[in-house]
């Protein structure tokens, strides 16, 4: 799996995913910190990421509106 970790979560989660054999990136490391949820969505979908966040409520709405397929939230 390929994960993108939201800025509301600690960067140490990247190492946890990588230690289990997954590709993983953090929003802060991609220069996307401070971006609105709606601005992150195109990156999440285009990158085929499973998005890891504490803000699932807002992102669920965006997934329903903007995508027919996604890797998960």
Image (cartoon, grey):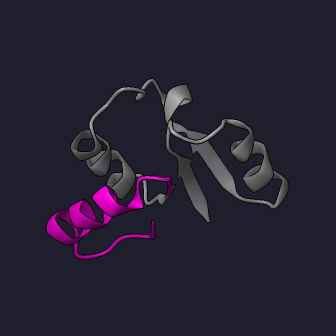
Query: Residue 31: x percent and y percent?
Result: 45, 23
Pick the residue in front: 49 or 52.
Answer: 52
Quadrant into which the C terminus falls? bottom left
Q: Which residue occupies 74% across, 39% down?
A: 12
In this view, 69 is above or below 51: below
Say left or right for 42 vs 3.
left
Query: Residue 62: x percent and y percent?
Result: 22, 60
Say left or right for 55 vs 66.
right
Q: Which residue occupies 40% across, 60% down?
A: 56
Tag count: 0
Residue at the left extreme of this rendering? 65
Queried whether the magenta region covers residue 56, the answer comes back as yes
Q: Which residue occupies 62% across, 66% down?
A: 1
Residue at the bottom extreme of this rendering? 68
Quarter of the image where one finds residue 71: bottom left
In this view, 43 is above or below 72: above
Pick the residue in front: 38 or 45.
Answer: 38
Query: Residue 37: x percent and y percent?
Result: 28, 44
Pick the residue in front: 3 or 6.
Answer: 6
The residue segment tinted magenta is 52-73
In this view, 18 is above or below 56: above
Queried whether the magenta region covers residue 70, the answer comes back as yes
Query: Residue 67: x percent and y percent?
Result: 22, 68
In this view, 43 is above or below 66: above
């Amino acid at each position: 799996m390929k994960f993108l970790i939201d800025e509301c979560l600690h960067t140490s989660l990247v190492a946890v995913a990588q230690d289990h054999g997954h590709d993983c990136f953090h929003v802060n490391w991609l220069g996307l910190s401070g971006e609105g949820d709606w601005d992150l969505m195109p990156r999440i979908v285009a990158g085929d990421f499973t998005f890891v966040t504490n803000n699932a409520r807002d992102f669920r709405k965006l997934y329903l509106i903007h995508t027919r397929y996604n890797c998960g939230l």
